[in-house]
Amino acid sequence: MNKPLLSRESVLEKALAIADAEGLAAVTIRRIAGEFGVTPMAMYWHFANKEELLAALGQRLWNSVEVDPEASLRELLTILVEALRAHPAIAGLADTQMLSSEGGLAVTERALELLAGSGFSVAEASAIARNAMQLAATMVIGEPGADVGISAAEREALVAMKCQRIGELSQQKYPRIVAAASALTEVDDVEEYYRVSIDLFVAGVETMARSRSLPGFS
């Protein structure tokens, strides 16, 4: 069988496949080199180090993002969440590469435009935009019951263990936590989970604008 051609693009594809299947911690120069049947030194023709590889993965994530010039804040968050959900293992890299890719720049520019148009200062708009980015990544990385890099059987066992721990709590002291054991450890309706989270963030920003008599934006 012919070995796959070693190139910058093929290395990124392999790194992404490993991250998707096993989590970001499994992505190493040595591991990828082994997948191609070459020495780690051969990898350095394409990436100087692991940090450069991870930066390229973060930029690749943004490559799938297309922004409507008229997109609302809610739509921007939805687009971003959808991009991160496609590769949750590398969702944490998106923030570091937001301003190093066309997709990230487009999302940021539109978000700042919307917020500035609603009367927020540059500092306020920047803080809100950063929080939106962090929220999107946190939602995806922390999706209950969707732990990255483990098999379905391992995920099921992990959820069962979490439920057991909650079930061992004092029902008298923590009645609401015990009653919500299932809801706290996995999501029955994933789309609803994301929709509610996005709605909460947008509603909070809208409330800030209204409380200061600023114009709406969504």
Image (spheres, rainbow, N blue to C red):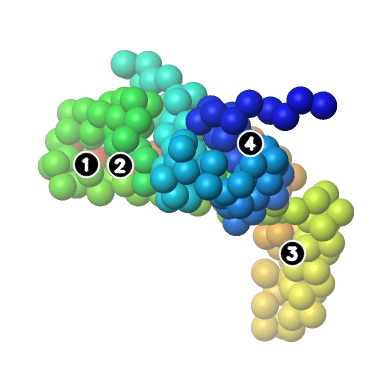
Distance between mark 3 and mark 2 Cα atoms: 33 Å
Mark whose residue sits in front, 1 or 3? 1
Answer whether residue 170 is visible to the viewer in this image: yes
| Quadrant the C terminus occupies | top left
Residue at 34% in and 25% down: 102
- In terms of sequence position, does the residue under pointer 2 or pointer 4 come before the other? 4
Query: Mark 2 falls on what kind of element?
Result: helix
Query: Mark 3 falls on what kind of element?
Result: helix
Residue corresponding to mark 1:
125
Distance between mark 1 and mark 3 Cα atoms: 37 Å
Residue at 46% in and 36% down: 46
Query: Mark 1 falls on what kind of element?
Result: helix
Instruction: Choose between 108 and 111: the one closer to the eye.
Output: 108
Callout 2 touching callout 1 (CB < 8 Å): yes
Residue corresponding to mark 2:
129
Mark whose residue sits in front, 2 or 4? 4
Distance between mark 2 and mark 1 Cα atoms: 6 Å
Q: Amino acid at mark 4?
A: Lys
Q: Amino acid at mark 2?
A: Ala
- In terms of sequence position, does the residue under pointer 1 or pointer 3 come before the other? 1
- In terms of sequence position, does the residue under pointer 3 or pointer 4 come before the other? 4
Q: Amino acid at mark 1?
A: Ala
Residue corresponding to mark 4:
14
Distance between mark 4 and mark 1 Cα atoms: 37 Å
* Residue 63, percent from left and from top: 45, 25
* Residue 42, percent from left and from top: 54, 41
Residue corresponding to mark 3:
181
